[in-house]
């Protein structure tokens, strides 16, 4: 199974949570699901998702068989199929859902926060299920090294890749990744449709998925106004450089520049900041495409200085979904655009 986006994980975890906490209204309608995703309590991070974003995530989760659409009523409803697809008992499903909803937690915190989903007898029983999840192939959770000042180590789920914001995996575990990156064992291979990451001297690096095609590159000037107070390019600008390259390619292949009726919308993006760009100079941004689905595709970028060819300063990417703007939901990619992704 490929790595899940943050929105997909939130949708799936909310369905697991509500199946246990509000059984009378489960399976959930779209309105109830959006409200659960945007809940202000018991959520880390707090999200503000639109119906369109949740529908895109539902389409992808249904394609992975993790969510089932229930018919037979005037309102379409959705239920999760997580335990069956992943081959996990209800206790493990509860722990993964809480980790997806609240972020990294200790075993004691998990026992407390998972009580409405499953009542664990003691902390050791929680740790037993966590150890079982960590020992699976691929691993579903990993234990982070204990941070200074903390008495207990925290656990993090790997369904969305290892993105903790802080902390590191225990010795022998996996390093952190960001966005749609996915931690893989050094000796393992990435599953089709995923991005493999690996640790190196320069930090975490992603490895392009098999079949990725380099389709575009651009040269852009570094501007004085791009600098932060330390004289380095502001981190947010790296995303802009990648987006300018992405849009330049999208418009070059025939997408309406006004994006008036339909077009690709980014639902998840990431960037690994490897070196600090400084004014003056020019950068070269390259772009590859991969993993075309019914409505989604992935783009990957590298950023180099023109005067230092081969030295990567940043690398990142995004998942985009072809969207019908009037309907505010995903739509199948047109055949002509799919051809430009695969030709």
Image (tube, grey):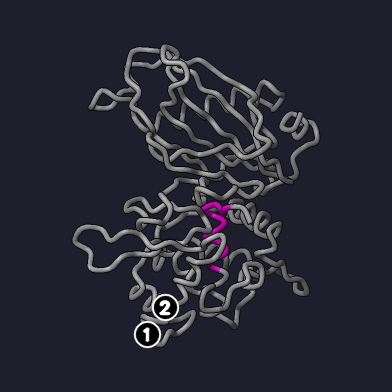
Identified at 66% across, 29% down, the residue is 213
Q: Residue furthest bottom?
A: 121
Magenta includes 11?
yes
Question: Residue 281: x and y, percent?
Answer: 38, 12
In the picture, which quadrant includes the C terminus?
Answer: top right
Q: Is residue 325 visible?
A: no
Q: Nearer the viewer, residue 64 or 123?
A: 123
Circle 1 packing at 10 Å, graded few (<14), some (14-19), many (20+), is: few
Magenta highlight range? 3-14
SS category of the residue bearing label 1: loop
Q: Nearer the viewer, residue 242 or 183?
A: 183
Identified at 61% across, 30% down, the residue is 288
Magenta includes 118?
no
Q: Quadrant of residue 26?
A: bottom right
Question: Residue 155: x and y, percent?
Answer: 39, 64
The reply to whether callout 2 and callout 1 are in contact (CB within 8 Å) is yes
Q: Main secondary structure of the magenta part?
A: helix
Residue hosting label 2: 126
SS category of the residue bearing label 2: helix
Question: Residue 290: x and y, percent?
Answer: 65, 37
Residue hosting label 1: 122
Decide: is 30 above or below 249.
below
């Amino acid at each position: 199974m490929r790595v899940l986006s943050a929105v997909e994980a939130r949708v799936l975890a909310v369905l697991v949570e509500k199946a246990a906490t509000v059984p009378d209204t489960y399976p959930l309608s779209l309105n109830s699901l959006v409200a659960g995703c945007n809940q202000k309590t018991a959520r880390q991070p707090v999200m503000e998702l639109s119906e369109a974003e949740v529908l895109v995530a539902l389409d992808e989760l249904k394609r992975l068989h993790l969510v089932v659409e229930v018919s037979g009523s005037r309102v379409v409803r959705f239920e999760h199929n997580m335990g069956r697809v992943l081959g996990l008992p209800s206790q493990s499903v509860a722990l993964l859902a809480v980790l997806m909803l609240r972020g990294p937690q200790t075993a004691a915190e998990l026992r407390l926060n998972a009580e409405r989903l499953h009542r664990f007898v003691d902390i050791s029983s929680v740790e037993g299920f966590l150890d079982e999840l960590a020992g699976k192939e691929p691993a579903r959770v990993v234990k982070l090294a204990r941070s200074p000042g903390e008495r207990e180590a925290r656990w993090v789920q790997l369904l969305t890749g290892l993105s903790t914001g802080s902390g590191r995996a225990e010795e022998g575990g996996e390093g952190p990744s960001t966005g749609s990156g996915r931690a893989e064992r050094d000796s393992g291979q990435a599953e089709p449709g995923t991005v493999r990451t690996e640790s190196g001297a320069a930090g975490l690096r992603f490895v392009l998925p098999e079949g990725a095609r380099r389709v575009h590159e651009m040269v852009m000037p570094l501007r004085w106004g791009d600098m932060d107070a330390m004289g380095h390019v502001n981190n947010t600008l790296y995303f802009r450089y990648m987006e300018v390259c992405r849009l330049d390619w999208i418009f070059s292949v025939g997408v309406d520049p006004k994006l008036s009726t339909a077009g690709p919308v980014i639902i998840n993006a990431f960037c690994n900041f490897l070196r600090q760009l400084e004014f003056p100079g020019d950068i070269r941004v390259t772009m590859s495409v991969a993993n075309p689905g019914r409505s989604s595709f992935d783009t990957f970028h590298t950023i180099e200085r023109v005067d230092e060819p081969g030295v990567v300063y940043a690398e990142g990417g995004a998942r985009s979904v072809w969207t019908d703007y009037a309907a505010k939901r995903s739509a199948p990619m047109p055949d002509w655009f799919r051809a430009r992704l695969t030709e």
